[in-house]
Image: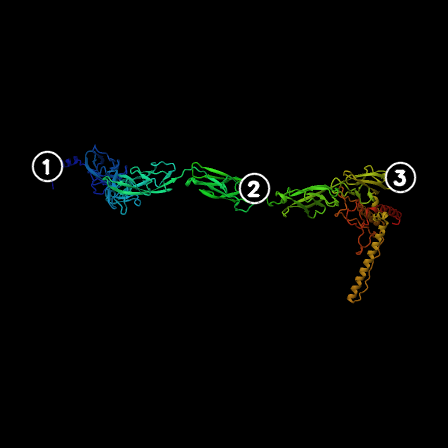
């Protein structure tokens, strides 16, 4: 449709107006529970933390222009929130408290830069359980009469909690319900006296009850919490006249002394009203028991004595005092009664006194034997003790003063009078040897009196002796030393035993016994020990004796001691050689030994020194003074030197040797010694030399050796023949004849024989070497451990002979260089065939045999 020009103009104006108009922005309204929009009906809990983002303002501009947000408050109120102008985020900047401010009014606005739209909003603050109950109208103090019935209401407490809902509801409890006399209503707070309980002013004037008010709980900052508070209710008990009078200071005791004046106060009783809140007046009166001897002041309670002590008929009076309350109206009220004991006291004017059979006595004597039985009563004492006072003044203790623990006194505590008994407590201490007289003091001293009167009496006990001791030696053993040459009847030692008993019981008799007592005697009274008159002591035979000595009293009580007697050695033996004439052979360079024995028991009496007193033809020897070894002087080194010294040109010497002991005085003896001197070359020329040398000085020895060889051969033949005969007889067989083929010995060449001779010479020489005995100063070398003398040698077998099983191998014996006597006091042993006394004969035969061998050398 075509428009006209006018219509076009109107349309253009309309478009222009629309183009120039700008509409205002507006908030969104999202309703209840929304946190985005215009805060309509917005509520916020009071426990929201400060700084929390609580809401977002949200709106729009019709033209789509950007908008900004603002919030403002009344100048008289706090600025609770702040807003981000660009995003509309509202932040809590102040702490909320519903109890102080439950609504917050604010003006929020939105602007697009040209238009500003503002709205008034109300933010509701919701409750949180942040308040505790609070008691009102404190402090709580209540006065309750003590006769209030059980279950009665006595007070009401009230607490308020500003919170709403369950957090604002309050219930009541008692803190210590089990120990309290009260109970509280949980809802109303009414405090009541519990059933079955009563109040008592006299027992407790106040009660303190702790009441707890607790709310119903609620949420606080995301957690369930319950708050409570406490208060104390002070219940003061009001006194009511319901208690009888009470006496103070019971029980009551009074004393009337001998010098008390009539009308004097004896004691005062005190009573008070049991109802102390409002006490009544008190009156005192005597009910009975006074017999007219006592009166009481009705207002003060003082009891008076009305008679003198001489008029009082009884020692103890039991009075009954009554006290009566008088009410404010003047009428008698409650009453009470109390007993009062009054004792008539005697003055302490008499000390304890001891009495004997004839009256007062302060010395008592008795004789008795020592060591009476334990618990025995000393019946010889008749003692009585008495105190004439009465009551406590007549009570005293008894005790004995003196050596403790010996006797005991009975009784130890006395009232008025008692018979005194003394009992043996320690029998061992009643010893005549320690105390001839025992003295004690018997002391009596009062117990409970201030004067402490006392008295004493002497008790003297003369002890009589009994045989209660054993003789005792002054030592358990006695040691004596006497010389062995002491004559018979010599004093050895004196023993002493003491018996403390007196009279015949203290006399001691001595005897000795034991294996060593045969040579000794003892004086029965003095205890001196002597040798028997015939006794001959020898320290070399027995050096020590011991035996027992017995000390005995007349009733056979005894004790023993041991006696040791040592014999002192005396130089009474001469040194002794085995033989006075001895012969030996000395190999050149090897010493020979001569020995003497001194049979004394101790040194230095048995120590022997040796010396050469004479030598023929000349002295070419030295002797060791201690061992007796004889050597050639150092200047003699060969047989030629000896040959030039002797006039006859031989090698034989004669010596006189002296043995002298070291005792005082000293003893000595001499022996003659013949020494043949040879060398090893002469001994090694033939194995027969040793035998010939020995046979030279002892031809009987050679004959004995030959006879022994023949006897051994015959005996062996008989034994072999007998054994063969019996063996053939038992077998009943004819044994064939055994042929024994013997190979004819082949003559040995001369060189072989020479080698054999050299070998045998060497072997013989080694066997003739002198074996030295170990040094044994001044002792006999023929001890049990020394080897026996060598036996005589058998004849040498021919060279290169076949060995025979029936003949023992031939050996050359060793010639001992020690000339020792036989052990003293031993049975004589058969003389050995090779004793050193035949050494000279052996030397001579050896020389002849060597000459014969030299003469027959041409045959070999």
Q: Please provide percent x and percent y for residue 787.
A: 76, 48
Residue corresponding to mark 2: 462
Q: Please provide percent x and percent y for residue 172.
A: 26, 44
**The residue positioned farthest toward the front in the image shown:** 358
Above or below, 715 relative to 592: below
Residue corresponding to mark 3: 647
Does residue 293 appear anywhere in the picture? yes
Quarter of the view holding residue 529: top right
Above or below, 837 relative to 716: above
Asked whether 289 or 848 is in front, the reply is 289
Q: Please provide percent x and percent y for residue 538.
A: 75, 44
Residue corresponding to mark 1: 6
Asked whether 497 or 443 is in front, the reply is 443
Label 1 – label 2 distance at C-alpha = 180 Å
Of pointers 1 and 2, the one earlier in the residue sequence: 1
Q: Assess disc 1: are there few (<14), some (14-19) or many (≥20) residues with their C-alpha within 10 Å of its C-alpha.
A: few
Quarter of the view holding residue 149: top left
Q: Is residue 709 left or right of residue 416?
A: right
Does residue 223 appear anywhere in the picture? no
In this rendering, the label closer to the viewer, 1 or 2: 2
Asked whether 531 or 860 is in front, the reply is 531
Q: Please provide percent x and percent y for residue 532.
A: 73, 45
Asked whether 226 or 290 is in front, the reply is 290
In this rendering, the label closer to the viewer, 2 or 3: 2
Q: Under tag 2, what secondary structure?
A: strand
Label 2 – label 3 distance at C-alpha = 106 Å
In this rendering, the label closer to the viewer, 3 or 1: 3
């Amino acid at each position: 449709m075509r428009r006209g020009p006018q219509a076009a103009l109107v349309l253009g104006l309309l478009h222009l107006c629309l183009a120039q108009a700008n509409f205002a922005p507006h908030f969104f309204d999202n309703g209840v529970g929304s946190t985005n929009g215009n805060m309509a009906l917005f509520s916020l809990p009071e426990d929201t933390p400060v700084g929390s983002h609580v809401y977002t303002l949200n709106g729009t501009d019709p033209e789509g222009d950007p908008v900004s947000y603002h919030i403002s408050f009344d100048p008289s109120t706090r600025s609770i929130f702040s807003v981000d102008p660009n995003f509309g985020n509202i932040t809590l900047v102040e702490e909320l408290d519903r109890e102080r401010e439950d609504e917050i009014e604010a003006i929020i606005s939105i602007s697009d830069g040209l238009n500003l739209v503002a709205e008034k909003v109300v933010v509701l603050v919701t409750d949180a359980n942040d308040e505790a109950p609070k008691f009102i109208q404190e402090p709580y103090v209540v006065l309750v009469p003590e006769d209030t019935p059980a279950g009665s209401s006595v007070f009401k407490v009230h607490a308020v909690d500003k919170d709403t809902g369950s957090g604002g509801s309050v219930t009541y409890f008692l803190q210590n319900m089990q120990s309290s006399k009260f109970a509280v209503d949980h809802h109303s707070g009414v405090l009541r006296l519990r059933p079955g309980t009563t109040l008592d002013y006299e027992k407790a004037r106040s009660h303190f009850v702790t009441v707890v008010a607790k709310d119903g709980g609620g949420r606080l900052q995301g957690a369930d919490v319950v708050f409570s508070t406490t208060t104390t209710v002070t219940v003061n008990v009001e006194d009511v006249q319901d208690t009888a009078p009470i006496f103070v200071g019971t029980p009551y005791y009074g004393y009337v002394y001998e010098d008390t004046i009539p009308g004097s106060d004896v004691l005062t009783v005190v009573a008070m009203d049991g109802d102390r809140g409002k006490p009544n007046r008190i009156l005192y009166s005597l009910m009975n028991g006074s017999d007219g001897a006592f009166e009481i002041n009705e207002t003060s309670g003082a009891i008076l004595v009305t008679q003198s002590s001489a008029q009082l008929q009884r020692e103890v009076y039991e009075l009954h005092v009554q006290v009566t309350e008088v009410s404010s109206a003047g009428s008698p009220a409650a009453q009470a009664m109390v007993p009062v004991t009054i004792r008539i006291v005697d003055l302490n004017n008499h000390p304890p006194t001891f009495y004997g059979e004839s009256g007062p006595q302060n010395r008592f004597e008795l004789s008795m034997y020592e060591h009476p039985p334990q618990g025995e009563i000393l019946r010889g004492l008749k003692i009585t003790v008495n105190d004439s006072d009465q009551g406590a003044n007549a009570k005293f203790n008894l005790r004995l003063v003196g050596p403790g623990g010996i006797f005991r006194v009975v009784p130890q505590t006395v009232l008025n009078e008692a018979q005194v008994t003394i009992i043996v407590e320690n029998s061992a201490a009643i010893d005549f040897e320690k105390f001839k007289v025992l003295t004690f003091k018997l002391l009596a001293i009062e117990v409970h009196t201030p004067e402490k009167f006392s008295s004493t009496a002497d008790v003297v006990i003369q002890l009589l002796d009994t045989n209660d001791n054993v003789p005792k030696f002054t030592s358990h053993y006695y040691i004596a030393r006497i010389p062995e040459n002491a004559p018979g009847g010599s004093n050895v030692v004196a023993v002493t035993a003491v018996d403390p008993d007196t009279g015949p019981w203290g006399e001691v008799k001595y005897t000795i016994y034991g294996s060593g007592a045969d040579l000794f005697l003892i004086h029965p009274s003095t205890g001196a020990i002597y040798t028997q008159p015939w006794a001959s002591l020898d320290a070399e035979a027995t050096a020590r004796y011991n035996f027992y000595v017995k000390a005995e009293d007349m009733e056979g009580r005894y004790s023993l001691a041991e006696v040791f007697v040592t014999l002192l050695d005396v130089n009474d033996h001469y040194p002794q050689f085995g033989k006075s004439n001895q012969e030996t052979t000395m190999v050149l360079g090897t010493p020979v030994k001569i020995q003497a024995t001194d049979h004394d028991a101790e040194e230095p009496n048995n120590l022997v020194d040796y010396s050469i007193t004479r030598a023929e033809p000349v002295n070419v020897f030295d002797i060791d003074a201690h061992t007796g070894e004889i050597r050639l002087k150092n200047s003699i080194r060969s047989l030629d030197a000896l040959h030039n010294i002797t006039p006859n040109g031989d090698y034989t010497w004669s010596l006189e040797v002296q043995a002298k002991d070291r005792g005082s005085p000293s003893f000595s003896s001499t022996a003659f010694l013949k020494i043949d001197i040879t060398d090893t070359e002469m001994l090694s020329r033939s194995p027969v030399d040793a035998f010939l040398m020995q046979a030279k000085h002892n031809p009987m020895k050679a004959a004995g050796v030959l006879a022994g060889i023949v006897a051994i051969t015959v005996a062996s033949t008989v034994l072999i023949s007998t054994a063969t005969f019996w063996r053939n007889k038992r077998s009943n067989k004819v044994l064939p004849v055994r042929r024994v083929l013997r190979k004819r010995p082949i003559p040995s060449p001369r060189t072989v024989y020479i080698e054999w001779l050299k070998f045998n010479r060497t072997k013989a020489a080694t066997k003739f070497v002198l074996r030295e005995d170990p040094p044994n100063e001044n002792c006999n070398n023929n001890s049990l451990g020394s080897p026996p003398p060598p036996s005589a040698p058998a004849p040498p077998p021919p060279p290169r002979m076949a060995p025979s099983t029936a003949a023992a191998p031939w050996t050359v014996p060793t010639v001992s260089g020690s000339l020792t006597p036989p052990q003293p006091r031993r049975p004589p042993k058969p003389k050995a065939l090779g004793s050193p006394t035949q050494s000279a004969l052996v030397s001579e035969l050896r020389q002849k045999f060597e000459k014969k061998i030299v003469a027959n050398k041409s045959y070999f």
